[in-house]
Image (cartoon, grey):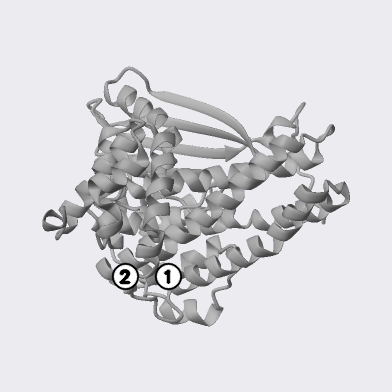
Amino acid sequence: MSEISNTIEQRAKILADFMTELAQGKNGAQLVKKYNILEINFIPKDILPAFDLLMERIDDINTVKVVSNKIFNLLYKILKSYPALTPKENTLLHFISIDNQLIDKQLQQLRPIQKKFIQTGNHSLLNQIKQGFIELQNVEKHYTLLQNIVFPIAEKHWQHHQCLSLLWHIQDLVVNKIKKIIQIIDTKPFEEKIFHKTSAEIFFDTYTLIFRENHVLIPALLETIDTDEIDANLQQATEIGLAFAQIPEQITKNNKTAKQQTNIQGLVDLHTGKLTPEQIRLIFSHLPLDITYVDENDQVKFFSQPPDRVFHRTKAILGRKVQNCHPPDSVHIVNKIVDQFRQGKKDKASFWIHFRDKYLLIQYFAVRDEQGNYRGVLEVTQDIADIQKITGDKRLLDWEE
């Protein structure tokens, strides 16, 4: 087998074939010998095309997750010993790496308490465990930053990037399971079996993400992408934040690009008025709703930035396929909406959900030109909690002098 494993494409095919047969239920030990898995020096960049091949063959993301856990378990020592590049100090990837260390530290502090509870059944430990998981909820910021800054940049440069969909899927699982376990602790009667199962899954999946970021994602980024392009997003990264690491304010100031263009000339003719680009930006940023525009080629072209935007957006998503901007579990809904709009069968889709302390109305509108040609989708998100409370009439100004 070694004579056909000397290129990334060949090694990726070996990994994909191995995982495909695993997914089909074949004996793992026999497959390891068949494909000589432990004798090949796999590198982080082999993972990218391997998962593209696998996900072309298997469309069930949960099955992909299961076999990915097995292959990473086998490749643990090989990937950990790979002489990977390390992020330069004060770069965004450096802060992401530090954040992973701090997430790991939080897990290490929480794990002994959880184990002690399992051994003793002492319910007085549950409040301490709950506080630990409440702090661990901060990992959502870490994952949001990756999804909105790092993933879009990777997609622009990597021919093979389906592995990012798998990471996003696991990230969502972790976030949802942390919320679930806090609810389990607060619910009476206490479901001990569900608690043990859910907490074990949180630890496993979170450690999984830390390892894959540190030993696949970040090394592959450093080998393929100029980090200046990633660091151009440091300011937006501070707006999203990380789980536990802090990006010093001075770093973001030093990395700001000259985006203040004070010498913009000319007006934009909007048919019902002519405005400067700055005026257009100000109007969008003061509307009490979030707007995102996706063109007819399914590429994100614009988003507004109101002060209290609900869902994070960064400039890294501009030009990104809208399908890649959503968790894998909801992509089929996105495709259905876009297809119906493109075919002219529908013009609007609406959803309303409770999200944190907000009640959101999320609407999608088909955008068409004067001739009725499909020109894309407009997503509008608004918090309607206060609107729902309105009753009667208000005709007088109630400002206090």
Identify which residue, 211 or 345, lies in the foreground: 211
Q: Is residue 243 above or below residue 65?
A: below
Horizontal side of 115 relative to 330 (left or right) equals right
Residue at (39% x, 80% y) in the render: 88
Residue at (37% x, 20% y) in the render: 346
Residue highlighted by disc 1: 93
Q: Position of residue 30 (x, y in %)?
A: 31, 41
* Residue 272 showing in the rendered view: no
Q: Secondary structure at mark 1?
A: helix
Horizontal side of 10 relative to 41 (left or right) equals left
Q: Secondary structure at mark 2?
A: helix
Q: Quadrant of residue 23?
A: top left
At label 1, the amino acid type is Leu
* Residue 206 showing in the rendered view: yes
Horizontal side of 308 relative to 122 (left or right) equals left
- Give the Cα separation between the discs numbered 2 and 1: 9 Å
Q: Is residue 272 above or below residue 316?
A: above
Q: Is residue 94 above or below residue 330?
A: below
Residue highlighted by disc 2: 222
At label 2, the amino acid type is Leu
